[in-house]
């Protein structure tokens, strides 16, 4: 067994600009793919979603470092990705039109106590998921819901219906 020296752990094995370019390309390709995949993948992680993210991380790791085992190369790629995350967030804050382009719109899945089946199918949301989220929000019946939306972050939000006055009339 050959001992690894500190100089090899921190050695730069691939050119710095190649690491930056690789990190940049992988960041933006994954950014686009995750946006196309839909908001639910980000808002609620199931077992399949977690598995997909782990496999993406593993597959993209080698693409970003070019097979390098250097700690420095890996940290440079990680810094590039974090940097692009900051730049994209800053750009979306500075330019609301870009934010609207990149961020998905909310989608109505319940309106006036009625399921919006077409929107539910498009977003892969089941009746049981809506009912479960209603219970978590303290809502007992679909009749209590004026509207329910899948928000851009993938979470369900509810607007309660105004209570109707029942009494002697």
Image (cartoon, rainbow, N blue to C red):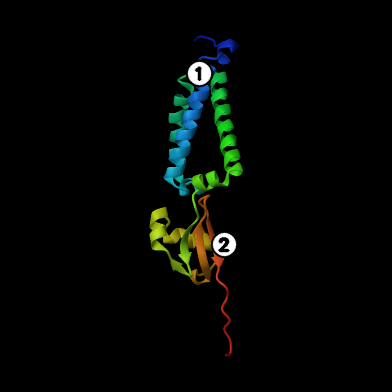
Are circles 1 and 2 on residues that touch, CB within 8 Å? no
Alpha carbon separation for disc pair 1 and 2 = 48 Å
Residue drawn at (55%, 65%), measured in percent from left and top? 159
- Reply above or below: 77 against 94: above
Counting from the top left corner in percent of width and height, residue 67 is at 45, 20
Tell whether 90 sits left or right of 66: right
Question: Helix or strand or loop: what does disc 1 sit on?
Answer: loop
- Residue 128, by quadrant, is bottom left
Dot 1 or dot 2: first in sequence order is: 1
Residue drawn at (60%, 43%), measured in percent from left and top? 93
Mark 1 sits on what residue?
69
Counting from the top left corner in percent of width and height, residue 118 is at 38, 60
Task: Residue 124: tell me if it is visible.
Answer: no
| Nearest the eye: 139 or 94 | 94
Question: Helix or strand or loop: what does disc 2 sit on?
Answer: loop
Counting from the top left corner in percent of width and height, residue 140 is at 53, 69
Task: Residue 81: tell me if it is visible.
Answer: yes
Q: How many marks?
A: 2
| Nearest the eye: 67 or 104 | 104
Name the disc covering residue 6, or none: none
Residue drawn at (47%, 67%), measured in percent from left and top? 111
Residue drawn at (41%, 58%), measured in percent from left and top? 120
Mark 2 sits on what residue?
137
- Residue 7, by quadrant, is top right
| Nearest the eye: 7 or 36 | 36
Counting from the top left corner in percent of width and height, residue 169 is at 57, 90
- Reply above or below: 146 against 75: below
Question: How busy is the neighbourhood of tag 2: few (under 14 within 10 Å), some, or many (20 plus)?
Answer: few
| Nearest the eye: 127 or 73 | 73
Question: How busy is the neighbourhood of tag 1: few (under 14 within 10 Å), some, or many (20 plus)?
Answer: some
């Amino acid at each position: 067994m050959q001992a690894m020296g500190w100089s090899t752990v921190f050695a730069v094995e691939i050119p710095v600009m190649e690491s930056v370019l690789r990190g940049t390309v992988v960041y933006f390709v994954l950014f686009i793919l995750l946006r196309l995949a839909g908001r639910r993948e980000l808002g609620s992680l199931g077992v399949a979603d977690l598995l997909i993210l782990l496999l993406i991380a593993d597959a993209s790791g080698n693409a970003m470092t070019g097979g390098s085992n250097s700690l420095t190369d890996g940290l440079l790629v990680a810094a590039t990705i974090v940097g692009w995350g900051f730049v994209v967030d800053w750009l979306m804050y500075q330019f609301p039109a870009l934010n609207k382009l990149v961020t998905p719109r909310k989608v109505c899945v319940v309106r006036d106590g009625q399921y919006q089946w077409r929107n539910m199918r498009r977003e892969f949301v089941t009746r049981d998921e809506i009912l479960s989220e209603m219970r978590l929000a303290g809502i007992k019946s679909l009749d209590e819901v004026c509207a329910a939306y899948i928000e851009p972050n993938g979470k369900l939000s509810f607007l309660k219906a105004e209570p109707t006055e029942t009494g002697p009339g």
